[in-house]
Every structure is written in structure tokens, then in C-alpha cells.
Image (cartoon, rainbow, N blue to C red):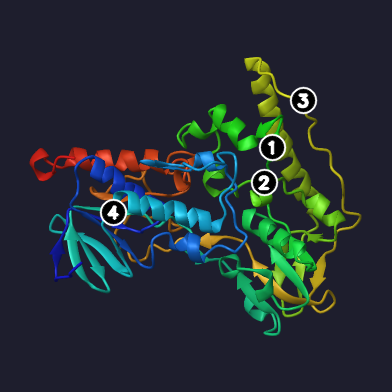
Amino acid sequence: MPFTDPEYVSVIIIGGGQAGLSASYCLRQRGIDDHVIFEKNRVAHSWRSERWDSFSLVTPNHQCRLPGHPYDGHEPEGFMVKDEIVDYIERYVRKFRPPVVEGITVTSVNKRDGYFHVTTDQGNWYCDDVIVAIGSFHTPFTPAGAEAIPDSIKQIHSIDYKRPSQIPPGATLIVGSGQSGVQIMEDLHLDGRQVHLCLGNAPRSPRRYRGKDAVTWLEEMGYYQTTIAEHPDKHKAINGTNHYLTGRDGGHDIDLRDFALRGVKLYGFVESIDFEKFTLRQDIATKLDSADRSYNGICQRIDDYIAQRGISAPPQAHYTPVWAPENEPTALHFAHHGITSIIWCIGFKPDFKFIKLPVFNMRGFPETDRGITEIPGLYFLGLPWQHTWGSARFSGIAEDAEHIASTIHASIPAHATSQP
């Protein structure tokens, strides 16, 4: 696409992942063909480059339903692996050929004289509407004190982990027990590595229960249709850590107590860091008990649903702990345990600094009403719990994209749009 300075287009979409592509599809369905997607890297970049080799979805394939492109494979209850996810998105691109420009970086977005002005490293643009579709997981978070750890210990973030062979010989310390932390732990453990895991507050979920995947049960129960406006604990929904489980090798539970029996060393929350050790909170048992309550709470909700509907489903017992800590250390000394690498799995911070408009709260997150900001024409798509649990996932992005596309369409005079 040629670049002039400045160039006008009706709508600019920033980000060429599933959110940006979904927005483009929904705009086209409403005859809004005059739009462009700016992607800094390649389409589906995060799936290609920011996941480890053995990565797989933790939700069943049947929940992959980009608008106009539902999952069409032969394993609806399976879990696509990394390369299959990329292929799913690439086939979407080939199917409707969105106007995407790869390798272009947006450096600023502002608004003046009734138009948005979008500056890129390949020219300047202006438009009526901007859809920011880059999610909110941008800058890997590393805690204070990490800089004091000796250089002899390799430190990486989960976003940079790819495979066990990149980790030096010796013991690996993983900090964080959310989905990434426990799955990377399993990846290294299966490779025969000694793994030490510092726990966070993540809850856990059963994989299968009473003859069906728990996610499938919860969707049937209407759980994923709950909106953020209806949620009884909005702060927990938005800021809480996702339940951990895995889709690896057909999918299974992640039981950290069982991994402890198999040799993984568990520790409590990291209170502080210095050059030789972590100082730890003595809360291993507390965190494991909390995760198990979440697990059994999901089981009970499914039990209640089955009973209320009179559904025939095989009975299954709730989880019973298989291990408990005999003691809880207050420190973890790197040299004593032979720690040669640390993998930080403690999340990301948003980075929307290129958007020079007052729509962000003190934590740097955009304030929106289902993706619509107080600045007319500025939208966000793909944020966690933007509308429902699925807003940042393949399962719910279509509904949010439809909502934003219809809002844009309603704001454009009929003569300004082409017919679909």
C-alpha cells in the first residue's frame, strides 16, 4: 500500500491479531470497506512468537469462533497447539482478505479538528474512527529486586521461554503459578529438570468432570454469557488470575500437590529478593487450599446444574488432597538449591503511551463502556472482561467486534458507506 503524508481512511484498526481481524470482518459486513489494519509485526504475531513450543489452548476448540470463521476441524473437544492456532488465523486472513499492512508501527494517536491523527513509522494518517485492538498484555512484569540477582543466574520472562533446551543445566526457579507458570513447570519437569515453583494466588479448574470438559459444562450453564456489569465481583473478575489447567496431550488437570510428590519443590509468595535468596511467605498450604476450593466449587456448580436439569451424567467425587507441606521455608537460597535460571511468570503491564488521549485510569488501562470510550470515535477491542469472560479470547471476540462495528456504522451517514 503506498503511503502519502497525510493520507485519509475512514477507520484505522491498530493490531493484526484476532481482535483486529474480527473488527475488520465486522466492518466489512456493514459495508465499511474504507478501513485499514496496521500490524507492527505479522498477523498473529503473539501466537507465533510469544508462546513456547508445546503451547496449546486451555479452552476446547469449539470455543474458537472468530466472526465468519468458527472452528471447522475434527476435534471440537480437543485443544489446538501453537502451529494449529497460527494456521487457524492465517486461514481466516485468506478467507476474507482483510486490508492489513504488516511491519508498520503506530507511534502516536491524537485528535484535533474533528479527526484522529495517527502517526506511524511509514507516514501520517487521519481518520474518523480508531479501533485499538492490541489487548493489554504488553510489557513483561519483573519485580523490584530482580536486578540484584547474580548475572550467573539466567533470568527470562515467560514471553521469552520456548523450550527446555534454552534453559541452562541445573535447577530452574519459576515464579508464578498462573497458567503460564504451571504449564512451563510441567514442560521442564517432563524434560527431567529440577523445578522450584513459587506460588501465586491463581485458582485452578478441573479439566473433565462427570463425562464432559468443565469448560463445555460452564458454557452450557451460561457462565460465559455473564457480563462484567452482572458480575458479583467486578474487581476480582478484571484483576484476578485465570484458573490453571492445560490442554496439553489431550488436556488434563494441573495438580500441584501431585507434582510435589513427583519432585517439584513448592514455595510460598516471594516477599523480597536479594543477591543470594528469596525471602518467602509461609503460605504454601493456604494457596493450595484456596486453589482446591476453586476446583471443587466448579465441580459443585456442575453438580447442581446436573441435578436441577435432571441430566444423566456419571457420578464423580470431588478432589481430595494428595499431599500437604510438612514445613514451609522462609527463604530459598539460590546457591544451596543449584538455581541456574529463573523464569518470571507474573504477568504484564499495559503500555498505551502512544495514545495521547485522556482515556486511561491510574493503572494505565483504558476506561470504556464495552470498548467505547468517552472520546467519540475511539474504541478498544480485545481487553479482558471488556464485556464477558471471552472478550479477550477466541470465544467472545466476535460479539464485541460486532458491537463496535455496529456503533461505528450507526455514526456514519448512509451515503458514506458502500453496500455489502
Three-letter amino acid code at disc 2?
Gly
Three-letter amino acid code at disc 1?
Arg
Give the number of the disc on residue 105: none
Give the number of the disc on residue 251: 2
- Inter-mark Cα distance, 1 to 4: 37 Å
Residue position for label 1: 208
- Inter-mark Cα distance, 1 to 2: 8 Å
Identify whether 409 is placed above or below 333: above
Query: Tag 2 or tag 4, which sits nearer the N-term?
Result: 4
- Inter-mark Cα distance, 4 to 3: 48 Å
Mark 1 touches mark 3? (CB < 8 Å): no
Residue position for label 3: 315
Depth check, front residue: 381 or 252: 252
Identify whether 327 is placed above or below 163: above
Query: Tag 3 or tag 1, which sits nearer the N-term?
Result: 1
Three-letter amino acid code at disc 3?
Pro
Residue 341 coordinates in the image, percent (x, y): 71, 75
Mark 4 touches mark 3? (CB < 8 Å): no
Give the number of the disc on residue 98: 4
